[in-house]
Every structure is written in C-alpha cells, then in structure tokens.
Image (cartoon, rainbow, N blue to C red):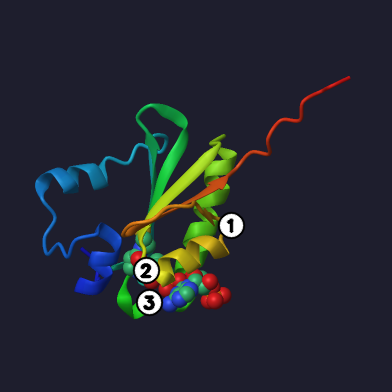
C-alpha cells in the first residue's frame, strides 16, 4: 500500500488496517473500467503511487456508484485529491451515471471539504458517518403542454 499514515488509513477504510486481506486486495484490484473504475496518481518517475480514486457501481443500480479516494500523506494539501476527484466526476458523467455517493467519517472534515469542493452535497443524517452525493444529470422537466 502506498504511504498512508494509520490516521489516513482509518479515515479511508474506517478502521486502522495494517495489511489488506486477500479479499480486500481482490476487491480493490478488480478494476474493469465499467463497474469499477480507478485512477492511480504516480510520482513523476512513475515508480510510486501517491493517490488513488475509484468508483464502484451499486450492485442493484447501474446508474449509481460509490466513490472513495486517498492521497499519500506527503502529497496531501497540494491539490492532488481535488484534481483526481474532479476527473472522476467528469468521467462518471460522461459514462452516463446519474449519481455518485460517498461516505466519510463525520470527523473527517478534509474528506467532506474535498467532496463538497467537487460539488457533492451532504445528506441529512446522524451517527459517525456522513453521506454525501452529487447528481450528475439534471432532472427531466415535465412537459405540461
Ligand atoms: C481527503 C484527501 C483525499 C484530500 O486530498 P488532498 O490532496 O489533500 O486534497 P486537496 O489538496 O486537493 O484539497 C482539495 C480541497 O479539499 C478540501 N480540503 C482539503 N483538505 C482539507 C481540510 N483539512 N479541511 C477542510 N477542507 C479540506 C478543500 O476544499 C480543498 O480545496 P482548497 O485547497 O482549494 O481549499 C486526503 O486528505 C486523504 O487522503 N485523506 C485520507 C483518506 C480520506 O479521508 N479519504 C476520504 C474518505 S473516502
């Protein structure tokens, strides 16, 4: 895994995982460009991953997908997360998705700030998680004649 501190890992995975299980590794690497789309940001020498963003379509709704993102600690605060997320939203829109959703821990103000800066709105709710979403298609106007 690229350089994520225990705190960043906790914010991304909601648990301070030290090592990915085989099952998790399988899920994270089954990128098919449709159901599961991911981008990896590399250092200029292309040897090290420093950020990854992905969306995975919902099993019961092909028009909706969940987004998750992480940027290596040394690269945070420099605009990489924002750039990756903007590209993801653009890609999802072009791919015809209606809705992107994201879940952050409520204490994760950087995660929520990043998503809101990209156009996501927080849904109402309580508890330890914050749900955010962005609608990608304008609602159809009713033609009332
Ligand atoms: C959340 C995360 C991806 C942000 O990546 P980043 O590269 O640091 O973000 P950027 O520098 O591109 O910032 C983009 C915008 O996010 C918001 N943001 C970033 N850090 C913030 C903070 N600490 N507090 C509030 N808003 C913040 C701002 O709106 C910022 O825009 P600005 O720089 O014009 O103000 C990164 O902190 C991270 O990997 N955290 C751990 C994993 C995680 O929390 N993932 C999100 C849940 S899935």
Along the line of sight, the residue nearer the viewer: 122 or 127: 127
Q: Position of residue 122 (x, y in %)?
A: 50, 56
Q: Decide: marks 1, 3 in contact (CB < 8 A)?
A: no
Give neighbour class at mark 1: few <14, some 14-19, many 20+ (Cα, 10 Å): some
Q: Nearer the viewer, mark 2 or mark 1?
A: 2
Along the line of sight, the residue nearer the viewer: 115 or 54: 115
> Going 18% across and 43% down the picture, which residue do you hit?
26
Q: Which residue lies furthest to the front in this view?
A: 126
Whether the residue under disc 2 has CB within 8 Å of ligand 1: yes
> Going 47% across and 78% down the picture, which residue do you hit?
78
Figure quarter occupied by ligand 1:
bottom left
Q: Where is residue 139 in the image (x, y as percent from the top left)?
A: 68, 35
On the rendered image, what quadrant is the C terminus found in?
top right
Q: Decide: marks 2, 1 in contact (CB < 8 A)?
A: no
Position of residue 2 in the picture relative to residue 55 (left or right): left
Q: Which of marks 1 and 3 is in front?
A: 1
Whether the residue under disc 3 has CB within 8 Å of ligand 1: yes
Along the line of sight, the residue nearer the viewer: 144 or 115: 144
Give neighbour class at mark 2: few <14, some 14-19, many 20+ (Cα, 10 Å): some
Q: Mark 3 points at which residue?
A: 75
Eyeballing the image, is 57 above or below 82?
A: above
> Going 49% across and 51% down the picture, which residue do you hit?
123
The CA distance from mark 3 to mark 2 is: 17 Å
Q: Mark 2 points at which residue?
A: 108
Q: Which mark is residue 145?
A: none
Position of residue 119 in the picture relative to residue 115 (left or right): right
Give neighbour class at mark 3: few <14, some 14-19, many 20+ (Cα, 10 Å): some
Along the line of sight, the residue nearer the viewer: 68 or 75: 68
């Amino acid at each position: 895994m690229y350089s994520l501190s225990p705190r960043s890992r906790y914010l991304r995975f909601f648990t301070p995982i030290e090592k990915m299980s085989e099952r998790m590794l399988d899920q994270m690497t089954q990128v098919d460009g449709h159901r599961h789309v991911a981008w990896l940001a590399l250092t200029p020498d292309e040897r090290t991953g420093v950020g990854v963003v992905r969306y995975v379509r919902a099993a019961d709704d092909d028009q909706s997908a969940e987004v998750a993102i992480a940027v290596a600690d040394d690269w945070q605060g420099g605009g990489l997360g924002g750039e990756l997320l903007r590209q993801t939203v653009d890609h999802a829109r072009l791919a015809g998705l209606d809705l992107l959703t994201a879940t952050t821990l409520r204490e994760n103000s950087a995660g929520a700030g990043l998503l809101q800066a990209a156009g996501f709105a927080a849904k109402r709710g309580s508890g330890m998680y914050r749900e955010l979403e962005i609608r990608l298609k304008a609602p159809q106007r009713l033609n009332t004649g």
